[in-house]
Image (cartoon, rainbow, N blue to C red):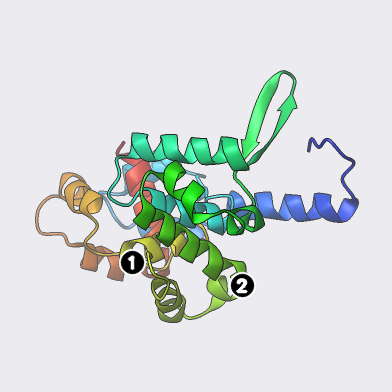
Amino acid sequence: LFSEQRLPATVQQAVAERIAFFLSLHDELEPFYAIGREDAAFVPIIERLYGLHHIKFLTLHEAACWAVITQHTAIPIAAGIKRALIERYGSSITVDGSTYWAFPELERLANLGMEELGVLLKNERRAGYFMNVVAALSGLDEQWLRTAPYDEAESWLRSIKGIGEWSANFLLLRAEGRMEHMILTMKPFLAIVPKVYGPGVTMAQLAERYGDWFGYWGYYLRAGTR
C-alpha cells in the first residue's frame, strides 16, 4: 500500500478487506464449476477462464454514478465524462512516476452544486438523477444491501429517481456481488446465448440450471465470448 501519510494498522486492514471484496477473493467457485461441468456448451468457457473471480466496482457509489452517466449515452462519451469528474473532484497519488486517480468520495459528491454538475455531466436531468443517487447512498447501510432479500434490495434501489430495473440489477451484481439474479431480457445475452447454445435454449432455462450462480454464469459467458 502507498500513501502520502502513514497508514494505521486498522486502515491497512480495512483496505485489505476492501480489496478482497473488490476482487471477490472469498468466493468459493467449486459449486459453480460443478454445475458448469454438466453444461457441455459452457465447459470450454470454464476451462479457458478457470479461477476467474468476479471483479466488482471498487465502491457502490462509483458504480451508481456510472449507471447514471451511461444512461442513453455511448460508452466512450460516458467514459470521458467520468474521467472529467474524477480529475476535477477526485484525488490522486503519484508512485514511481505514475499518477493514479481515485473516484471522488461520496461526501465530496454530496456537496456539489447542481449548476456545476449539470455543466460537467452535459445534461441537467442527468445531474438531478446523479444527485438523487448520491443523497440516497449517503444514508445507506451497505451491508443491508448485500444481505437483504434480493427483491427488497432491488425495490429500495428502484425507489431512487433515476434508478430503473437495469441499473438496480447492475448495482446489486457489479457492486455488491449479488450473483443470484440477472435480468432475463438483457440484449447482449439474447445475442450471445444462441451462438453458444444453439437455438431453443432460453435465459430462463439457464437461470433455473445455475440458480444462485446465474450471475457468475453471465460473468463468465460475457468474458469468455469477447
Return the x and y of residue 102 as percentages of the image width and height.
Answer: 63, 41
Q: Residue at x 34, y 39 (%)?
A: 75
Q: Residue at x 15, y 59 (%)?
A: 201
Q: Residue furthest front?
A: 115
**Element under disc 2:** loop
**Element under disc 1:** loop
Return the x and y of residue 3 as percentages of the image width and height.
Answer: 81, 37
Q: Quadrant of residue 128?
A: bottom left
Q: Quadrant of residue 156?
A: bottom left
Indicate the amino acid at tag 2: Gly
Indicate the amino acid at tag 1: Gly
Q: Is any atom of residue 37 visible in this view?
A: no
Tell me if 20 is positioned left or right of 56 in this view: right
Q: Is residue 205 above or below residue 70?
A: below
Q: Nearer the viewer, residue 114 or 4?
A: 114
Within 10 Å of disc 2 (Cα), the crowding (few <14, some 14-19, many 20+) is few
Tell me if 95 is positioned left or right of 205 in this view: right
Name the mark on residue 164.
1
Q: Which residue is mark 2?
A: 139
Earlier in the chain: of badge 2 and badge 1, it is 2
